[in-house]
Amino acid sequence: MIHFTRTLVRGWVEKLLHIHDSPQRTAAAYALGVFWGFSPFFGVHTLMALICAFVFNLNRIAVVAGACTNLPWTIVPYYTLVTMAGAAVTGARLPPDFADRFQQLNDLSLFSRAYWTGMLDLLWPLVWAFHLGSLVGAVLLATLAYVLALPAITAGRRHIHLRTPVVEPPEAG
């Protein structure tokens, strides 16, 4: 009974995780996760990555690992840089009194309606720049992730196969 249950669970886990995918598919799954992790849809990126993993039948662990690549200390610099790049392309400009208005908003409560409507009004000129910049940045980072992950996964699998001893079948006697 235990052997049957273990075999059933192992088969289910292998189907769920796609452990035996090719290195190309695993690298593509990781790159897809990186795309969603750095996309403009921050906040729902893990959910979107998992939906795509199920739709395209990809390795769920690799997709989630890619989506979690955008770490807390990289979020602000990344989104600032790509928004600046998007603003350069779209020609978006901040209002001249941006710093004063931003300081006034910080004096309000984070939970007040006035804070959020004021912040939306202040940042509205950058909405398209943010989306364009982070979308292009996500595509570039996903491409880089695939290029770097593929040889790493291939080398890792080769290393595992070299270290795994070949078990000879018992002699028929």
Image (cartoon, rainbow, N blue to C red):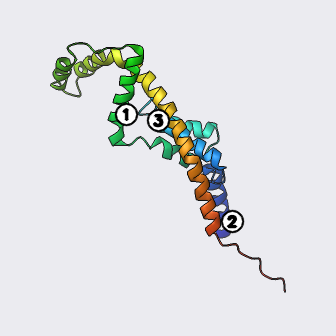
Identify the amino acid type marked 2.
Phe
Q: Are marks 3 and 2 in contact (CB under 8 Å)?
A: no
- In this view, the residue farthest toward the bottom is 173
Mark carried by residue 167: none
Is 160 in front, or is 15? 160
Q: Which residue is under mark 1?
A: 78
Identify the amino acid type marked 3.
His
Q: Are marks 2 and 1 in contact (CB under 8 Å)?
A: no
CA gap, disc 3 to disc 2? 37 Å
Identify the amino acid type marked 1.
Tyr
**Neighbours of disc 3 within 10 Å: few (<14), some (14-19), many (20+):** many
Element on which disc 2 rests? helix
The N terminus: image quadrant: bottom right
**Of the image marks 1 and 3, the number of the one nearer the N terminus:** 3
**Neighbours of disc 2 within 10 Å: few (<14), some (14-19), many (20+):** few
Q: Which residue is under mark 2?
A: 4
Vertical comparison of 15 with 124: above or below? below
Residue at position x 15%, y 25% in the image? 107
Element on which disc 3 rests? helix
Residue at position x 46%, y 37% in the image? 37
| Quarter assignment of residue 104 | top left
Residue at position x 33%, y 34% in the image? 77
Which callout, 3 or 2, points to the residue nearer the camera?
A: 3
